[in-house]
Image (tube, helix red, strand yellow):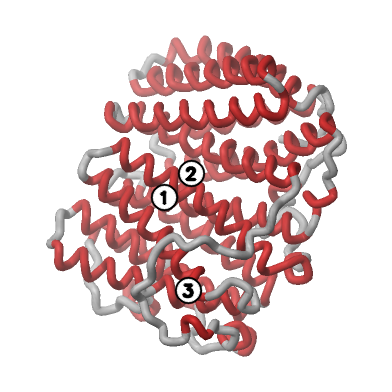
Amino acid sequence: MGTTQASLMSCSRRQQRPLPVGLLVLVTLVLASCAVTPRAHHAAADRIDRHVDSEYVGGNTAVPAGPVLRTADAPSQAVALRSELERLLGAHMLLADELVRATLRSDPAQIAASQAAVDANRQRLATDVANVSGAAAAGAFGKAWEEHVQILVEYASALRDHESAALPRLRTGFSYAERHLGAALGQVVGGTVPLSAIAGAVAAHYRHLLGQADAFAAGRYDKAYAVQRDGFAHMLMIADVLARGVAAHKQLPTAELDAPRRQLQSALSHLLAEHMGLMVQTMRAANDRTPDLPAAGRVLDANTKDLAGAINALYGAPAGQRFLTIWADHVDGLVHYAGLAAAQSSAAKQAETTKEIAAYAPVLARFLAGATGGKIPSVELAGALTEHDQDLRSQVDAYAAMDKTKAQQMATHGYDHMFELSQSLATAIGDAVAQRLPTGGVRTGGGGMAGRLPGAGSLR
């Protein structure tokens, strides 16, 4: 991460724009790999570029946000359930961490917004459980889920108030809540997954939640973000196991869960949803100038590299490097925008940065349209990417204006949108290309698909 300021500025398209001093270190970290990325178009990337859709050849950056992407096919019941559980369980990890951090910082407005978001997420999960497993299972699940969140908040409060004597009692209480949650999840899957496997998965979730709280309270921010990353990946793995368990209980076909494009959909959902969550956290840290800002930048950089790794696996290294450059500019512009909001910069400066951010959408849209062989028109992709940027800008605008409820609503909308985009991209890319993605995704060590059913005994 020893990138110099000169190499950073030569890599960025915004090299004439002065960066706020407080953001320079962060952007250096985020774009470190960009400094060694060739700008010349390599052959593989050129082949993708030549597929530019005729609807968007002009490169117009005035893109309407939010058109419906037309390539999302109808998934099977098992696939739809897994995607829904990935979305909600992953969101829970991010939201619970944000609730802990707001508690540690004694931020009443953010505590209220985060608690409301955690509760809404729990209610959505309970509704899904009721739909697939009945009211009794949903009732047991909702009670156990609420119990473990309440103890987590008490634990964070004890850390904040330096009540070290209370921590062992709360850890024991959390352990009991973990058992209740494991039993409730056993009801959800109708006994099709060994209880020992469920208990192990819930225990790992327990370690992730308390581990990141301990690390954040101690100022060990790199560890806190690393634990959050592991916890997010683990929740998506649990989603796969639960979806397969429910499918087995209800005798639903599961073959489509293992189709390459559905595996790719899960991998993209993981990385893009995590990107949204990390962008929200990083932009808010930039707005508040909190001490975790450099660590947030480093973990955002790791997510960016994993996204580029997915493109690399699908289309080769030149395409992966080209994607990395475009995506890094996207990250750079949004973090810079958050800094301007924090500094209460002039409307003219914010408008200029907004225009620069908007320019990324058509560039990446043309790239992705080529990657899908034109199956998704560039104009539709540009609209979806513009909506993503608008969600991120809107949430930090609301956050800076102290409307943290609205900020959370915009962040949730943007997070959900990433799952829709992932499904459309995976469907358009198709099985033939998707099968190039290594089993377990692009992260090393087996990735999120390790330890699936049957057995699920390797969940950790």
Residue 145 against residue 208 in the figure, above or below: above
Q: Earlier in the sequence, mark 2 or mark 3?
A: 2
**Is the residue 401 above or below the residue 168 in the image?**
below
Amino acid type, mark 1: Ala
Residue under the point 35% across and 49% down: 293
Looking at the figure, which quarter contains the N terminus? bottom left
| Contact (Cβ within 8 Å) of mark 1 with mark 3 | no
* Residue drawn at 64 percent across, 77 percent down: 317
Instruction: Say if mark 1 contacts mark 2, CB within 8 Å.
Output: yes
* Closer to viewer: mark 1 or mark 3: 3
User: Which residue matches tag 1?
Assistant: 296
Foreground mark, 2 or 3, reads 3
Q: Position of residue 138 (x, y in %)?
A: 64, 20
Q: Read off the residue under disc 3.
A: 379
State the CA–CA distance, disc 1 to disc 2: 7 Å
What is the quadrant of residue 160 in the picture? top left
* Crowding at mark 2 (Cα within 10 Å: few <14, some 14-19, many 20+): many
In terms of secondary structure, where does tag 3 sit?
helix
Q: What residue is shown with label 2? A: 225
Q: Quadrant of the C terminus?
A: top right
Residue 217 in view (yes/no): no
Decide which of 322, 69 is in the foreground and name it.
69
Q: Position of residue 213 (x, y in %)?
A: 46, 30
